[in-house]
Amino acid sequence: MSYFQKVMLPRIIFTIASALVILAYFTNIPDLRAISSELTSWGVVIATVAVAIGTFSLLRVHWDKVSKRSKGYSYSAWTIFVMLATIVIGQAFGLNSPAYGFIFNYWYGPLYSAVYCLIAAYSLSAAYRGFRIKNVASVVLTLAFLLIMLNEAPVVGISWPIFGPLATWINRVPLASGMRVVLIGGAIGLLALVVRIMSGREKTPLGIGGET
Amino acid sequence: MSSSMSWLERVYNMRRPIYFLLIILCVIPLVFPIKTPVGISPETRAVYNVIEKLPADSVVALDIGVDVAMWSDMEPAVVAALEHIVVRKSIKLVAVSFYPDGPILIERAFAAVDMKNKKYGVDYVNLGYLVGGETAIAAFAKDIRAVLRSDFRGTSISDLPIMKAVNNAKDFSLYIYVIQADPATQIRQISVPYGVRMIGLTTAFARPYCMPYLLAGQISGIVTGLRGGAEYEYLVGLYRFGLQSTTTMSIVYIATVLMVILGNVLYVWLRRKK
């Protein structure tokens, strides 16, 4: 593949498409908005195709493991079986069918929820071992944690309303200002990433390779 | 664990007893439920008031942005919102999801509400899942029919009476986003460009992400997690999983506070001994 096809063409497509969509977002030019609308519709179609490609890639990776009898290949075989069974049942009976509902409600749902629930157990254990009053910063952090936890406990929140205004202040002032920093910092970082991709300095998102 | 450890050190380093304690504390109040009171936060009351003030001819969008793992945290709030909007206020509701688990969770929520005389396709609808993340949200907001041909149950959108007057995001009076993490995409693609008022039903984890938008007025109110769900159930007059869980929440949160205090007492005690 030539350099133009591999590097320049994806960058040109990315730059033109991004510029059109960004301009349409901030202006009110009907033609530009129509083009942007068309491009976003294409995006949905491309994403749908990407799901199909992702499914195929996943099947190929696990099939390779099974065919080579690599370590843990039985898990790959199980993954392939569950994936194909879900696809076949979903296509044959529909996503709203009792058969598909059984997979979702009695396999996928409980398993996924159980994994998530482990976080709750680890959180309590981590809170017990992690919140140690060692210096001023840790005192502030621990006190804020205790205050928020007590206020979130319904019976405490209503029995001792003193916690309410303090917890509200923590949520609305230090927490919100901290999150603003994170959000604005992330947005500026994203903007910088777009400029880097457009200028050809960042090639990883286009699937070409590392930084230049 | 070394046998030379004192019992205090053993308590200080314990892990498994904590997990066991958590299970016991969660299960007992669920098996023997006790009604405990719950205070209403200003954020939950704001959500209730926004819905209460909607005109009767409004159409509300419900976007399920969580996966099934978070559903137990969000289900009470979603069901209470459906009860409030569709049953009590008789306002039309269009549900959609940009998460793969969303459509089935919407069906679960519909099934959990006693819809009385409300009809699917006329008063409420499930448009299903739209793949593509933010691009799909933008495309949906611009022209629903350009990206969706049928609802989740396979009915053509043109055959759904509820969709007659709904073409794009401008046709929604309110956008309810069930938030797993950051609500920025929906604010960026729907709320700001189309001037649609937004409220959030958020997981407890997503609350910090929502606070800057809430304070800026870009989100009019939030119902946070299971606790918020319990508050909303109380406001709507339901007694379901949210209010049934208030005792569990109280016990587990207080236990967490006590564990942190115990951990610090042991830390100071053992450090002095050394």
Image (cartoon, coloured by chain):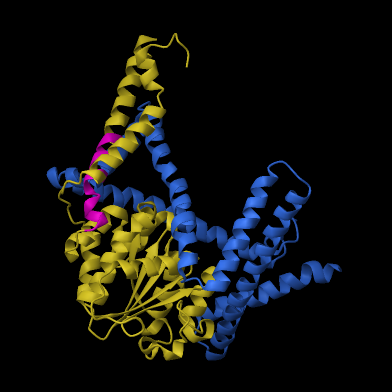
Task: Report the magenta residues as a range.
Answer: B240-256
Q: From this viewpoint, is residue B219 visible? A: no
Residue at 42% of width from left, 58% of height from top?
B180
The percent coordinates of residue B139 (x first, y second) are 52, 79
Does B74 sit above or below residue B59? above
> Could you tell me which residue is drawn at 33 percent across and 85 percent down?
B122
Residue B264 falls in image quadrant? top left
Q: Quadrant of residue B7?
A: top left
The answer to whether residue A39 is visible is: yes
The quadrant the N terminus of chain A occupies is bottom right
**Residue B246 lies in the magenta-colored region:** yes
Q: Position of residue B253 (x, y in %)?
A: 27, 40
Hue of chain A?
Answer: blue
Colour of chain B, in one word, is yellow
Q: Nearer the viewer, residue A172 or B76?
A: B76
Residue drawn at 74 percent across, 49 percent down: A65
| Nearer to us in this view, B254 or A51 | A51
Q: Main secondary structure of the magenta part?
A: helix
Percent of width and height locating residue A121:
40, 38
Give the side of residue A125 with respect to residue A68, left or right.
left
Q: Residue furthest right?
A: A2
| Residue A67 position in % (x across, y down) | 77, 51
Q: Horizontal placement of A28 versus B213: left or right?
A: right
Q: Is residue B24 above or below residue B51?
A: above
Q: Which part of the image, by quadrant, shows the C terminus of chain A?
A: bottom right
Q: Is residue A62 magenta?
A: no
